């Protein structure tokens, strides 16, 4: 495991997960709910920025590694899953939405692993619909975590709309990836 700047940022993102969750377990006498929401939102945004930054730095510094390629998506999925579970627990997101998003991530991760094993990883490379899903999700989650008006924007209403859009895009992208992989899956069954 090479210890370089991108991998260190990825590890930092993983370390931020218990910090993020722990914020909501602090008593309101220590950290009022509004401050919990703000701090959790900041931690989530910092994690999202490090996700972009570690990939950028890995390419720019020539520090890409197989370990980094493995760890980076794991860190992303863990942070998103933690945020969704907390949002469900806080009553700010529907459990069905969380199950759709988390279930899709598990399914597509397994599919990508299997496709890589059979030498067809390129057929399930990230598609535009997956990028749209990520953009909607990564905008919705901080808005729902913040749980208060943001300037003149109703963050809760916008976040709720975006999380449902994200769930639809999540299903759409899962179907897209499964359809792309289906010929290879069928060929393997016949072999």
Image (spheres, rainbow, N blue to C red):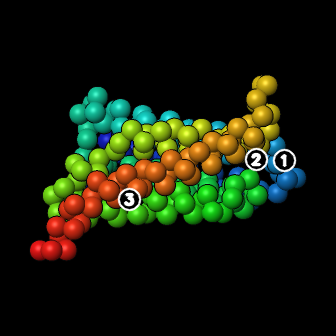
Label 2: few (<14), some or many (≥20) within 10 Å? many
Indicate the quadrant containing the C terminus: top left, top right, bottom left or bottom right: bottom left
Query: Image point 69% across, 59% down: which residue?
Result: 94
Of marks 3 and 2, the one in the foreground: 3
Query: Where 100 sits versus 132, above or below?
Result: below
Question: Taking the image as drawn, is residue 180 in sight?
Answer: yes
Mark identifier at residue 108: 3
Residue 127 vs residue 12, the one in the foreground = 127
Horizontal side of residue 22 vs 111, given as left or right = right
* Image coordinates for residue 173, horizontal then vertical, percent: 42, 50
Who's the residue at 56% across and 52% down the image? Answer: 167
- Report x, y in % for residue 143: 68, 40
Q: In 3D space, how far apart are the residues under numbered discs 1 and 2 (Cα atoms)?
A: 6 Å
Label ID, residue 36: 2
Of residues 64 and 107, the one drawn nearer to the viewer in this rendering: 107
Q: CA distance from mark 3 to mark 2?
A: 32 Å
Q: Quadrant of residue 174?
A: bottom left
Identify the mark at residue 170; answer none if there is no mark. Answer: none
- Between label 1 and label 3, give the one nearer the viewer: 3
Q: Secondary structure at mark 3?
A: helix
Please give the label number shown on residue 32.
1
- In the shown orientation, is residue 166 left or right of residue 74? right
What is the crowding at mark 3: few (fewer than 14 residues within 10 Å), some, or many (at least 20)?
A: some
């Amino acid at each position: 495991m090479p210890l370089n700047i991108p991998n260190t940022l990825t590890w930092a993102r993983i370390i931020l997960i218990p910090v993020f969750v722990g914020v909501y377990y602090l008593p309101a006498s220590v950290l009022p709910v509004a401050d919990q929401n703000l701090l959790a939102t900041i931690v989530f945004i910092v994690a999202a920025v490090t996700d972009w930054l570690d990939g950028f730095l890995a390419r720019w510094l020539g520090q890409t590694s197989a370990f980094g390629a493995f760890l980076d998506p794991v860190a992303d999925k863990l942070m998103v899953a933690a945020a969704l579970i907390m949002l469900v627990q806080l009553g700010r997101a529907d459990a069905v939405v969380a199950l759709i998003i988390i279930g899709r991530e598990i399914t597509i991760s397994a599919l990508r692993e299997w496709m890589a094993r059979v030498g067809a990883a390129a057929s399930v490379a990230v598609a535009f619909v997956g990028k749209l899903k990520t953009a909607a999700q990564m905008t919705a989650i901080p808005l729902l975590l913040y749980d208060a008006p943001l300037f003149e924007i109703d963050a809760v209403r916008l976040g709720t709309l975006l999380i449902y859009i994200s769930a639809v895009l999540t299903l759409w992208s899962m179907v897209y990836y499964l359809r792309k992989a289906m010929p290879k899956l069928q060929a393997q069954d016949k072999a």
